Structure formats: C-alpha cells, structure tokens
Amino acid sequence: MTRLRSEAVDASKPMTRALVSGRCNAYIRASLAWSDLIAYASDHQEMCDISGPALSAWEKSQREAVVARNNVCAGRPVRPFPPDVIRP
C-alpha cells in the first residue's frame, strides 16, 4: 500500500520543460498509478484498515490525475486558467 501510494504521488509531481508527448506519457503513468492504488485499497479496505475518508481522498486525487492527463494529452494546460477579473 505504501509503495503504491508513493508511486502515485511521485508520478503526479509537476512536470515542466518536457515535450508534449513525454508529458502526456508521464500524466498517463500518474493516472494509472492512482488507479492501481484505488483498486488495491478498495479490494483490501477492511484488511488494511483503510478509512472511508482516506479512500475518498485518493479517489479525488485519481479523478484529478485523469483530468490533468486528458488536458495535457489534448495540448491544453493541466488546469484551466481562472477567468480574468475585470473591475469597473
């Protein structure tokens, strides 16, 4: 469990100055690492005494990794920029 979580966190670290295809592959690996963690945690939740909130937090991280992967692989920024605030 610890190894899977460490791999997911390491794979999710920000990537800069990489070619788009390399960044896409890195984000694919990150989303797969989070998916592996979720699958293991779900299958062994009772045996490993994994709390519901912990599992929910990991699922949220996995969803964010999938959104980031989809954005990067489509050539968009990892996260959309917030709209500019125009003040009168």
Image (cartoon, rainbow, N blue to C red):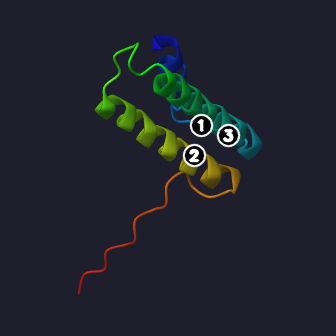
The residue lying toward the viewer, choosing from 38 and 10, is 38
Amino acid type, residue under disc 2 in the picture: Val
- On the question of residue 18 being in view, the answer is no
The residue lying toward the viewer, choosing from 16 and 65, is 65
Residue 10 in the image: x percent, y percent? 52, 23
Amino acid type, residue under disc 1 in the picture: Ser
Residue 45 in the image: x percent, y percent? 41, 22
Residue for badge 1: 31
Dot placed on the residue nearer the N-terminal end, 3 or 1: 3
Q: Provide the secondary structure element on which disc 1 rests.
A: helix
Dot placed on the residue nearer the N-terminal end, 2 or 3: 3
State the image quarter where residue 26 is shown: top right
Q: Nearer the viewer, mark 2 or mark 3?
A: 2
> Residue 23: which disc?
3
Residue at left offset 63%, top offset 52%: 70
Q: Provide the secondary structure element on which disc 3 rests.
A: helix
Residue 77 in the image: x percent, y percent? 57, 55
**How far, Cα to Cα, is label 2 from label 3?**
13 Å
State the image quarter where residue 54 is shown: top left
Residue at left offset 63%, top offset 33%: 32
Dot placed on the residue nearer the N-terminal end, 1 or 2: 1
> Residue 66: which disc?
2
